[in-house]
């Protein structure tokens, strides 16, 4: 991607936050599995994946804070922003529900992150490109783990298949947001910072559809529903997620471990 | 009290770093792990170390930086600056070949050589590893993620001992 137009500082920050917040909020949801995994190996898997995602979020939020230049570091961005300032994909703030929905969501999101990191390697924002190069290696393992489980649970027992189909029916409408371009996306893409979301769809489908087929799951029909997490308009679940996440910093401002 | 006469030499700095172990895998040093990318000394006892993190969320990253500062100060540095460099991204290919034998002796199977990065999401068949204790090939993978982000957990069906595999990155 070559720089063709300039991006305002605020636009640049928001573009990075859209990527950072998706990693952060998914990391937060996966952290809820700590101590509650169905078996110890999967408890460890989900929490390790959460750690990778939080690590990505730390790098990206630090970068966003530096671009913004108002003294907000990774902690202030994570713990002191209000709900409407978060720019994550709505799918990642949804409740975990059960292991099946958690795994399927990890799969759908990792399949989106993989081509995103790949495109970002040629971003005009060189720090973002460096973070993407690093994150791509970890996402590869997340994708393998989630795809493997999606097949085993989908093409599993009657009960596991029932739960996976419910999960797919529930999550599928939120995937439309992954590929919906808006004004900011077009401006940031024109500046060479990020790919257009719609550009990621072919690679995502090429990864996702064969796995769902192997998992013997029925892909729901597309509807006009569009979630709006990337524009800061969140589901009813976001407030409940942020409350415990931010409670300590809001109660004891400046507290540190 | 006399101040330190000689500034730290570049060789001394590297030697000091060679004695800093990875906190989770103490048999190999941060140099053997491939995370120290550059060392510069100025004439006045100042040292600049450039490191690269392994995994984004590795909780040992800050501890390693502290250990590097402490080791260089013990070696006589007056000011130590640790800089993090993200690109090029760390890869297990940077692990010193000599360190691979140390890993195996410690009970961790070293990472396989890199394959092409076009990995398929389906059918991640865990590679068959030789048990680092008894050498048997009759082993199985228990978990793709282990006690640390960088390792997977295996078990030997011959000697019944668990062991870890350092995942290729």
Image (spheres, rainbow, N blue to C red):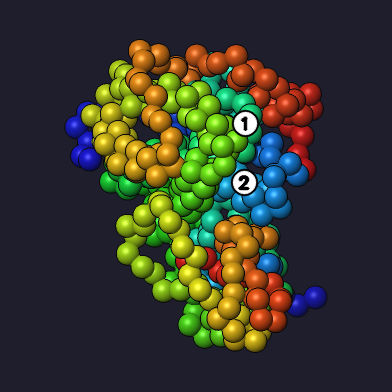
Give percent across and percent down for residue B21.
66, 74
Question: Position of A202 compared to A98: left or right?
Answer: left
Other residues around mark 2 within 10 Å, as few (<14) / some (14–19) / many (≥20): many
**Quadrant showing the N terminus of chain B:** bottom right
Percent x, y for residue B51? Answer: 52, 63
What residue is drawn where x is 69% and y is 40%?
A33
Q: Residue at x 79, y 24 (%)?
A: A251
Where on the picture, by quarter, is residue B137?
Answer: bottom right
Is B131 left or right of B116, judged from the image as shown?
A: right
Can residue A3 be seen in the rendering of this structure? yes
Label whose residue precedes the other's in the sequence (2 or 1)? 2
A23 in relation to A239, above or below: below
State the mark number for residue A96: 1
B132 to the left or right of A165: right
Which residue shows up at 37% across the image and 40% down it? A213
- Under circle 2, the secondary element is helix
Q: Chain for mark 2?
A: A
Looking at the image, residue A146 lies above or below residue B151: above
Task: Residue A46: give its label.
Answer: 2
Identified at 22% across, 36% down, the residue is A3
Q: Is residue A85 left or right of residue A206?
A: right
- B162 and B56: which one is in front? B162
Tag 1, which secondary structure? Answer: loop
Place of residue A236 in the rendered image (x, y in percent of width and height, measured from the top left) = 60, 14
Q: In this view, does A15 lie above or below B5?
A: above
Q: Which of B33 and A144 is in front in this view?
A: A144
Tell me the subunit letter for badge 1. A
Q: Do labels 2 and 1 share a chain?
A: yes
């Amino acid at each position: 991607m070559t720089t063709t137009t300039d991006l305002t500082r605020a636009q640049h920050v928001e573009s990075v936050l859209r990527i950072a917040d998706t990693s952060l909020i998914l990391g937060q949801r996966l952290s809820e599995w700590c101590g509650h995994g169905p078996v110890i190996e999967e408890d460890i898997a989900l929490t390790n994946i959460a750690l990778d995602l939080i690590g990505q979020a730390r790098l990206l939020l630090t970068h966003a804070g530096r671009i913004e230049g108002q003294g907000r570091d990774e902690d202030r961005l994570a713990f002191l922003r209000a709900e409407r300032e978060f720019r994550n994909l709505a799918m990642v703030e949804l409740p975990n529900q059960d292991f099946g929905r958690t795994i399927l969501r990890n799969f759908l999101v990792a399949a989106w992150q993989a081509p995103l990191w790949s495109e970002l390697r040629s971003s005009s924002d060189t720090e973002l490109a460096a973070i993407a190069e690093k994150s791509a290696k970890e996402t590869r393992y997340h994708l393998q783990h989630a795809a493997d489980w999606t097949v085993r649970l989908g093409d599993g027992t009657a009960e596991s298949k029932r739960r996976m189909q419910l999960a797919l029916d529930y999550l599928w409408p939120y995937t439309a947001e992954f590929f919906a371009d808006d004004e900011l996306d077009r401006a940031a893409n024109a500046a060479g910072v990020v790919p257009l979301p719609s550009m990621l769809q072919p690679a995502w489908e090429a990864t996702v559809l064969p796995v769902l087929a192997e998992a013997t799951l029925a892909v729901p029909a597309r509807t006009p529903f569009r979630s709006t997490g990337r524009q800061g308009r969140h589901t009813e679940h976001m407030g409940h997620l942020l409350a415990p996440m931010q409670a300590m910093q809001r109660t004891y401002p400046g507290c540190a471990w | 009290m006399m101040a330190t006469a000689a500034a730290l030499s570049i060789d001394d700095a590297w030697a000091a770093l060679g004695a800093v172990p990875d906190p989770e895998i103490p048999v190999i040093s941060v140099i053997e792990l491939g995370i120290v990318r550059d060392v510069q000394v100025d004439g006045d006892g100042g040292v600049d170390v450039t490191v690269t993190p392994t995994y984004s969320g590795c909780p040992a990253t800050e501890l390693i930086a502290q250990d590097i500062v402490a080791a260089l100060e013990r070696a006589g540095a007056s000011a130590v600056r640790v800089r993090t460099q993200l690109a090029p991204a760390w890869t297990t290919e940077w692990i010193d070949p000599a360190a691979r034998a140390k890993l195996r002796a410690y009970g961790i199977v070293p990472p396989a050589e890199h394959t092409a990065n076009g990995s398929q999401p389906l059918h991640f068949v865990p590679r068959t590893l030789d048990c680092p204790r008894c050498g048997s090939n009759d082993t199985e993978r228990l978990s793709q993620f282990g006690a640390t982000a960088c390792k997977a957990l295996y078990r030997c069906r011959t000697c019944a001992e668990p062991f870890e595999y350092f995942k290729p990155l």
